[in-house]
Amino acid sequence: MTADAGQAGSAEKLRRLQTVTDAALSQLGIEDLLDELLERTRDLLRADTAAVLLLDSSGTELVATAASGLEREVRQGLRVPVGHGFSGTVAARAEPIAIEHVDHTNVVSPVLLSEHVQSVLGVPMVSGGRVIGVLHVGTLTPRRFTPDDVELLRLVADRATLATQARLSRLDRAAALALQRSLLPARPQAIRGLDVAVRYVPGAEVGVGGDWYDVFDLASGHIGIVIGDVAGNGLRAAVVMGRIRSALRAYAMETDDPADVLTRLDRKVQRFEPDAMATVIYAVVDADLGAVTLSNAGHLPPVVVAPDRPGRLVRIPPDLPLGAYAEAHRRNTRLPLDPGTGLFLYTDGLVERRGRRIDAGLTMLTEALVAGPADTMCAGVMAALLYDRAPTDDVAVLAVRRSEPPA
């Protein structure tokens, strides 16, 4: 082949590669996007089959997500353990692998075998230095894939990864926000004798996370109040938050002791959410509203706001966060709750900011809090601390005030 012919061939391959991720694909949803990408990949590499397998949330198995010529892999929910078979080995090694003669010794997918695929080439899909999946093509006749084939498929995988990750990130954010909104209603449950208000703002940089608040009445007549923050952000943090929130409510039905509830909740997190960590304050208001008992699992201290007094941070000992250490000791703190007195709880996104010490944020918070209706307290704090820019981390705040007795 002459130099001119080689350059022409390279230019043609580049032109065909660019068709894999042209502007038309930007309008497609994730399923249609992958289907179209695989059709174009088959044409580009003159292959008979193409498939994408994405790593599941556990990071231990690849799941058939889209296929062209191997649609049964998707319909049957094919899962391949990382390190096993053809695709699993590509993911484990994070490098391309070509097999010229496919058989049961080098492939575990029954669909590849039943469709009589003879040769396969697979490359890892890598994002941020981490394998997120595998893209592979196959032929129904024996074929020796060339270094040019490998390079082309790697370029396709890189472009497919970028497009897929962008769409998955948008889907995750939308799903997390929907979950967050379903669990964090804008107007909390009305409880006689208490004035309650809340605010929630997703972070501008990390998006929706694991912040939550909750207020509920108990069969004993007591009232449960919660503010919490699951470490991390995105859909996983929101899902873990939802599970922890539900479990806390269940344990609160069994005891009015906040430290006992958080001890049980910590055991649940240690057992069923081994990679999760969360800070939580759980408070229980007496049935007669005269006092409140709090237990703090590593969260920032609440603020008490009394009539004719500046807001003050509650001296409540912080125990270890949930998920930090098995069998962590937990304590209670009891405070009077006089008529007109409010309790303000918040997550760290409210007071933490780059270039500002957290002590300064806490001082701004206490200075901004003035006794009054719960909604006024929330509005005043948000205006004072978020006046010049959107929060980088998500923010949840909860104000609870014992109503004044009628004149």
Image (spheres, rainbow, N blue to C red):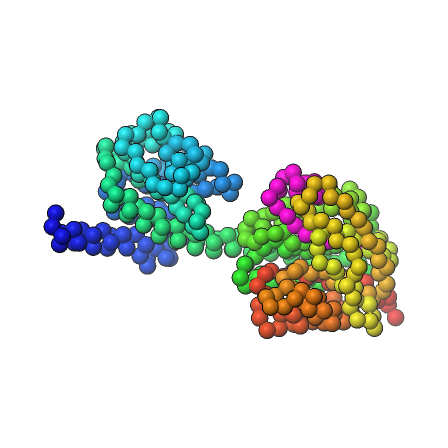
**Residue for point 36% across, 50% down:** 158
Residue 174 locus on image (x, y percent): 51, 55
229 sits left or right of 77 in the view: right
Residue 102 at x, y = what percent?
30, 30
Q: Is residue 57 left or right of residue 47?
A: right
Q: Residue 290 appears at what percent x and percent y? A: 87, 58
Q: Nearer the viewer, residue 212 or 375?
A: 212
Seen as rendered, the residue at the extreme left is 2
Numbered label tally: 0
Q: Is residue 256 left or right of residue 150?
A: right
Give percent across and percent down for residue 125: 39, 46
Tell me which residue sits at (30%, 36%) in the image.
Answer: 98
Q: Quadrant of residue 145?
A: top left
**Magenta-colored stretch includes residue 153:** no
Does residue 201 show up?
yes
Q: Vertically, is 254 above or below 381?
A: above
Nearer-the-camera pick, 4 or 105: 4
Looking at the image, residue 51 lies above or below residue 394? above
Quadrant where the C terminus sits is bottom right
Residue 195 at least partly seen: no
Report the front residue among 275 and 247. Answer: 275
Residue in the image at 47% along x and 55% along y: 170
Q: Residue at x 74, y 72 (%)?
A: 367
Using residue 35 as the reference point, say whether residue 403 is left or right of it.
right
Q: Say which quarter of the image contains residue 375.
A: bottom right
Magenta stretch holds residue 277: yes
Q: Which residues are magenta?
A: 264-285
Above or below 293: residue 273? above
